[in-house]
């Protein structure tokens, strides 16, 4: 499981310190000029909340998305699946998930003690394709990773991360994913999410 983080919201619907990303997102998602940042300890968060002048704000650094923004953007295919990965360090604790673009519903989530962001992005796409096949849905899959898309095209994970006891379970899944790609075909389009124009992909973990 990801380590506990504390989220400071200086500018949002209700400024304060929050114990989860979901609580932070409720205060900042769609709020113009939102300013917030995550911290590893509650003490750091309390100090930062009182002295915000020197802080590099996460909310000011990247364009964020909200459900209303997605609905208004005619360039985005709403009935689609978005996938993304997050890694605490690279390598480090890694997780990936799939989120339906139109509804914001999380369709799957996987977590590993050690991995890389690129591996997570690769696995997320394959997991997404397999999930769509299971549900018998022919809708696009969005990813913001060109590296993962190139690996999918080759049907091979290109990571150089060593396989040992700490990565054994993850690499077992990688091999299963490669085998799935070699044995299956799919009609679902794999599309690149345009972060610069559209903001963060809906599956983003918001922990950058």
Image (spheres, helix red, strand yellow):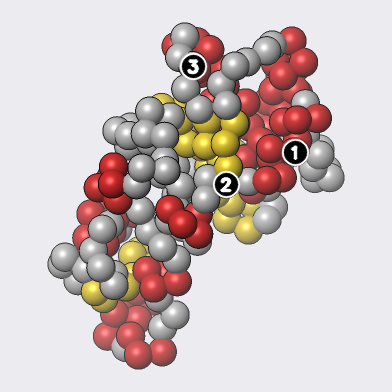
Q: Position of residue 125 (x, y in %)?
A: 60, 31
* Residue where numbered disc 3 is placed: 138
**Relative vertical location of residue 78 with respect to residue 67 in this rendering, above or below:** above
Q: Nearer the viewer, residue 36 or 202?
A: 202
- Residue ID for mark 1: 150
Q: Looking at the image, tell me whether mark 3 or mark 1 is earlier in sequence order.
A: 3
In the rendered image, which quarter is residue 31 located in?
A: bottom left
* Disc ID at residue 144: 2
* 165 versus 13 height, above or below: above
Q: Secondary structure at mark 2?
A: loop
Residue sitting at x 57%, y 36%: 191
Element type at marker 1? helix
Q: State the SS at label 3.
A: loop
Q: Residues under labels 3 and 1: Cα distance?
A: 21 Å
Q: What x and y, as percent, mark residue 128?
A: 54, 26
Q: Residue furthest left?
A: 14
Does residue 21 appear left or right of residue 2 in this picture?
left
Front position in the image: 100 or 47: 100
Res. 84 visible in picture: yes
Question: How packed is label 1: few (under 14 Cα within 10 Å), some, or many (20 or more)?
Answer: some
Callout in the foreground (2, 3): 3
Q: Residues within 10 Å of mark 3 (few under 14, many from 20)?
A: some
Residue 147 to residue 35: above or below:
above
């Amino acid at each position: 499981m990801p380590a506990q983080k504390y989220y400071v919201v200086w500018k949002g619907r209700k400024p304060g310190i929050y114990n989860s990303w979901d609580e932070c997102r409720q205060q900042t998602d769609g709020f113009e000029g939102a300013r917030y940042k995550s911290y590893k300890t509650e003490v750091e968060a309390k100090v930062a909340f009182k002295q915000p002048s020197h802080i590099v704000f996460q909310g000011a650094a990247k364009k964020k998305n909200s459900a209303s923004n997605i609905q208004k953007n005619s360039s985005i295919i709403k009935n689609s699946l978005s996938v993304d990965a997050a890694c605490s360090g690279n390598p480090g604790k890694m997780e990936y998930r799939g989120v339906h673009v139109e509804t914001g519903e999380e369709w799957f989530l996987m977590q590993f003690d050690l991995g890389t962001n690129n591996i997570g992005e690769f696995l997320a796409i394959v997991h997404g394709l397999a999930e769509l096949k299971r549900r018998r849905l022919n809708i696009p899959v969005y990813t913001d990773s060109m590296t993962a898309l190139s690996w999918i095209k080759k049907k091979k994970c290109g990571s150089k991360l060593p396989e040992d006891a700490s990565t054994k379970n993850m690499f077992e899944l990688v091999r299963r994913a490669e085998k799935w790609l070699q044995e299956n075909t799919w009609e679902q389009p794999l599309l690149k999410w345009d972060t610069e124009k559209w903001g963060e992909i809906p599956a983003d973990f918001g922990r950058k």
